[in-house]
Image: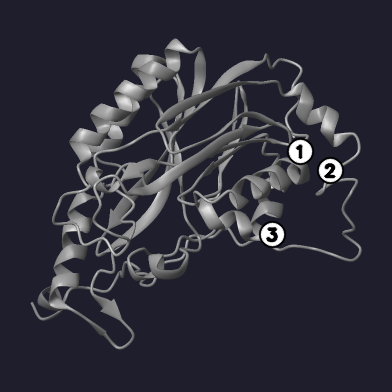
Amino acid sequence: MKSNSNFSPFTAAVVQGTPVPFDVSGTLARVDELVASSVTRGAQLVVFPEAFLGGYPKGHLFGSYVGGRTAEGRDAWRKYWEAAIDVPGPAVTVLSEIARKHSVYLVIGVIEREGGTLYCCVLFFDPFGKFMGKHRKLMPTGAERMIWGFGDGSTMPVFQTPIGNIGAVICWENYMPLMRAAMYAKGIQIYCAPTADPRPSWIASMQHIAVEGRCYVLACNQFLKRRHFADTYPCQLGDDPELILQAGGSCIINPFGEIIAGPIFDEEAILTAEVNLDDVLRGKFDLDVTGHYARPDIFQLSVDERARQSVTISATSAVPLAQENS
């Protein structure tokens, strides 16, 4: 772990915001507004929820059932693909400019498209507008596997920055003990947890992770009502415009498991709290789960961070047939 001797306390913000579902330009405008509001509260790090840009299609079946898909479902997924973003691409450029303009670290959940596959991702930007990198969700949950692909070990970063070591684990990835162990081993201090889980039980999980990892946990979810989607949106949860589809539950937790901001439910909100990395080291005094509290003589974890490609094409030095026959 990097020494924290030069780190000063700073303000972090989690944005329990409402995007414009499936509208990239409209949501980017919302991101700019919400980052600006966070900065007025003193934030130097701003975290947005899972799938904030590109959309989390809560309650959508995409016409899929065991053994078949409907034509309408295929077309709905096509439209969802069109609402996703390229990484890198124009939307990433806009996000970089937002981070630069407001001089903040920006961590945001997006839906990335590559070829014919969508990925649930988190993107990271520094205050100078540099795109630092991304994390692709390793394990989509339940019906998410119909619409999203699987990430691999090549995008599990923890970034060493002047405000601390920042990483992200998305939604129910947080229930993967071995993934958490890998992040702890990388020295994560500011553990961002963008999610789509609004249940009160989520808070207990975030407190456990903060204690287990002796890190700050910044948990962030959207606030969405049925009316935020188009009238034609086929939501299986109901059609009452005031029906809450994502209730939030965002919070910030310190390395001793104490909730220092939130949780807030059933409304939009920006939560802020002071992050003091001295508390990370104070906590490591009696619990460092990949250090003095580990038993490597009994338990070991092997992590494969190689990028995985389904097709690898190697260049050949063979003489083209046309030259061979000349």
Visible in this render: residue 159?
Answer: no
Name the residue nearer the viewer: 50 or 91: 50
Type of residue at label 3? Pro
Label 1 or label 3, whichever comes before in sequence order: 3
> In terms of depth relative to the viewer, which is nearer, 33 or 114?
33
Q: In which quarter of the image is the C terminus?
A: bottom left
Residue type for callout 2 = Asp
Mark 2 Cα within 10 Å, few/some/many (few <14, many 20+)? some
Distance Cα–Cα, label 3 vs label 2: 15 Å
Q: Which SS class for mark 1?
A: loop
Q: How far apart are marks 1 and 2 (CA)?
A: 7 Å
Asked if labels 3 and 1 touch by Cβ distance under 8 angstroms, the answer is no
Q: Name the residue under label 2.
A: 288
Q: In this view, does 322 lie above or below 55?
A: below
Question: Looking at the picture, how far across and down is residue 22, in whole percent?
Answer: 22, 47
Q: Is residue 74 left or right of residue 13?
A: left
**Residue at 91% across, 63% down:** 297
Tell me which amino acid carries mark 1. Arg
Residue at image mark 1:
214
SS of the residue at dot 3? helix
- Report the disc number at residue 177: 3
Check whether the beta carbons of the residues at disc 1 and disc 2 lie within 8 A of each other: yes
